[in-house]
Image (spheres, helix red, strand yellow):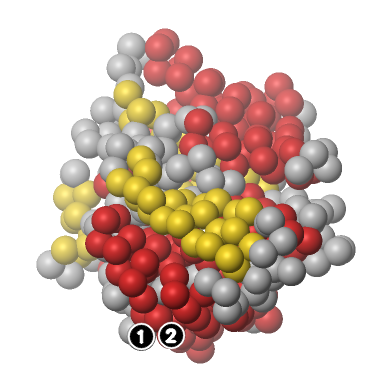
Amino acid sequence: MTRISSVSLRRVLDSRGNATVEADVLTDAGGFGRAAAPSGASTGEFEAIELPAQEAIANAREHAVPRLVDTVYAGDQRAVDNALRAADGTDDFSEIGANSAVAISMAAAKAGADTLGAPLYQHLGGAFRGDNFPIPLGNVVGGGEHAKDATDIQEFLSAPVGAPSVEEAVFANAAVHAAIGDIFDERDIGAGKGDEGAWAPPIDDEEAFEIVDEAVSQVADEVGFEIKFGLDMAAAEMYENGAYQYSDGEKSTDEQIEYVADLVEEYDLAYVEDPLDENDYEAFAELTEQVGDQTLICGDDLFVTNVSRLQDGIDANAANSILIKPNQIGSLSDTFDAIELAVENGYETIISHRSGETEDTTIAHLAVATDADYIKTGTVAGERTAKLNELIRIADDAV
Ligand SMILES: C=C(OP(=O)(O)O)C(=O)O
Ligand SMILES: [Mg+2]
């Protein structure tokens, strides 16, 4: 039986050294699941609410745990998530915290899988999943909200689109990261690392483009398959007083559209996330019209894994892909609903980590379970390699 027999919550560290919520769920039959909530730094305005960890834990213990224990079956994910929604009573999980909600939701899924003796990706995705793997987008250079005194653009992402296997793709991204480190050494550029393990160099975006382009071509030649790159511009963070604020001046919305369209052409970008402000569906639609047949225009802060915001985007023809972050919406059921709506409407899906992470590997399983096109989960750093290594294990039938 997958009936939940206990839910324990505790405060643990995330990769930035902040407190986050970890949940353990046990079932009558001895099934066990553990999951922890990640945390964003460049969060979207419309995300579900993350409460301070202790407050989220106290509120979830009072309101959510009694509704789950001895009542709900961990194998019935909708019932788990409906109980969390009912316990919370708000649209944005501001009562029990999206951090408690998502940790419990993911831990219950793992407990359900464990009770059934199935890997998580199979419990979530069914018997026919496990043969297709997402392309990992690997953050290799970055700045923005993730590192001070580095690039304006938040993330430069290696995209090994021609890799014959997920394992080779993961190693290609690590090789691009290493090649960039070598180029910095040659140019005497001292670079630290940002929150996600990407290089955080004190250079302008133009030089970063040149270096990433060189590293990607060099590694592609070495490995013998195509590697492109992409960006997370996190433009909502730059948008102030009606314009996009760069270190060397500001750009109007029209100038930003032109700038991004030119970058797509010049560097043959595979992917551009949040190139425009999170409230500007119209500008997203204009850019998608211009370059959407050449690249992925992805909504992260724009859609926040929320079906209603995604539906608005579909209606406006804004973007052609969606970033999926379970903690932006607070439950796996809501996450699946967003993925389903995206797929039905021809939007590609990119399952994503947050800048604050733990060793939790749920998103690797989620990507395989939903046959996602891409996964964005870093390149190096233990909390990132935890997910990448889990993908390699899934491909090797070793989970
Ligand atoms: C992973 C990201 O960063 P954060 O978690 O800080 O929102 C992102 O913006 O896509
Ligand atoms: Mg983003």
Q: Secondary structure at mark 2?
A: helix
Tell me, yes or no, whether the two marked residues, 1 and 2, touch with CB atoms within 8 Å.
yes
How many circles with numbers are drawn on the protein? 2
**Name of the residue lying farthest toward the left:** 241
Residue sitting nearer the eye, 325 or 80 = 80
Q: Position of residue 80 (x, y in %)?
A: 56, 75
Horizontal arrangement in the rendering, residue 354 relative to residue 375 (left or right): left
Q: Which mark is residue 319?
A: none
What is the crowding at mark 1: few (fewer than 14 residues within 10 Å), some, or many (at least 20)?
Answer: some
Horizontal arrangement in the rendering, residue 281 relative to residue 380 (left or right): left
Q: Position of residue 35 (x, y in %)?
A: 52, 52
Residue 74, quarter of the rendered image:
bottom right
Q: Secondary structure at mark 1?
A: loop
Q: Assign the N terminus to one quadrant of the image.
A: bottom right
**Vertical placement of residue 116 versus 338, above or below:** above
Tag 2: amino acid:
Ala
**Name of the residue lying farthest toward the right:** 128
Name the residue: 49% across, 62% down.
7
What is the crowding at mark 2: few (fewer than 14 residues within 10 Å), some, or many (at least 20)?
Answer: few
Residue sitting nearer the eye, 75 or 192 = 75
Residue 375 in sight in this render: no
Marks 1 and 2, how far apart at CA = 5 Å
Q: Which mark is residue 86?
A: 2
Q: Position of residue 124 (x, y in %)?
A: 71, 65
Q: Assign the C terminus to one quadrant of the image.
A: top right
Residue 362 in sight in this render: yes
Name the residue: 55% across, 59% down.
25
Tag 1: amino acid:
Gly
The residue that mark 1 highlights is 89
Q: Position of residue 13 (x, y in %)?
A: 36, 40
Q: Mark 1 near ligand 1 (CB under 8 Å)?
A: no
Name the residue: 64% across, 63% down.
27
